[in-house]
Amino acid sequence: MNIKSVEDALEVISMSVRNTRGLKNYRQKDLSKILGFSENTIIRIEKGSGGVSLEKTLAVLKELGLLEQAIAGLIPSSEPTPVEVYLEKGNTKKRVRSKNVVERKIEW
């Protein structure tokens, strides 16, 4: 994924934290107790609203096993992503049928 701004990074982190927490059957309250943070801190990270220290965000990512993926995803790649290649070819107005959509875990 090509992250171009802080807002993009926060969006990716928030979605990943929310999805992974759900997959691990953690409630926000559980995760906050494990890490010793307020539940509001976890909520702010999951909303991507910012205002959370880098230290706390990294601790949440580490607890959920997302730290290495997060760091790798923030490093710019010199190669375009498949989505960027697709869009460069002008393929922007095609429909996606719901029966062909497969739910999958977000990877960085």
Image (cartoon, rainbow, N blue to C red):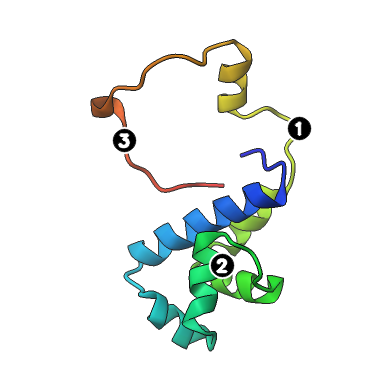
Q: Amino acid at mark 3?
A: Val
The residue sitting at the top extreme is 90
Residue in view at x 70 percent, y 70 percent: 54
Element under disc 3: loop
The residue that mark 2 highlights is 61
| The image quarter in which residue 67 lies | bottom right
- Quadrant in which the N terminus is drawn: top right
Q: Residues within 10 Å of mark 1 (few under 14, many from 20)?
A: few
Q: Amino acid at mark 2?
A: Leu
Q: Nearer the viewer, residue 99 or 108?
A: 99
Q: Nearer the viewer, residue 69 or 27?
A: 27
- Which callout, 2 or 3, points at the residue further toward the start of the chain? 2
Relative side of 101 to 66, left or right: left
Mark 2 touching mark 3, by CB under 8 A?
Answer: no
Q: State the separation of the CA atoms marked 2 and 3.
A: 25 Å
Q: Position of residue 2 (x, y in %)?
A: 66, 38
The residue that mark 1 highlights is 78
Residue in view at x 53 percent, y 89 percent: 36
Circle on res. 102: 3
Relative side of 73 to 93, left or right: right
- Which callout, 3 or 1, points at the residue further toward the start of the chain? 1
| The image quarter in which residue 83 lies | top right
Q: Is residue 83 above or below residue 13?
A: above
Q: Position of residue 28 (x, y in %)?
A: 41, 75
Q: Nearer the viewer, residue 73 or 14?
A: 14
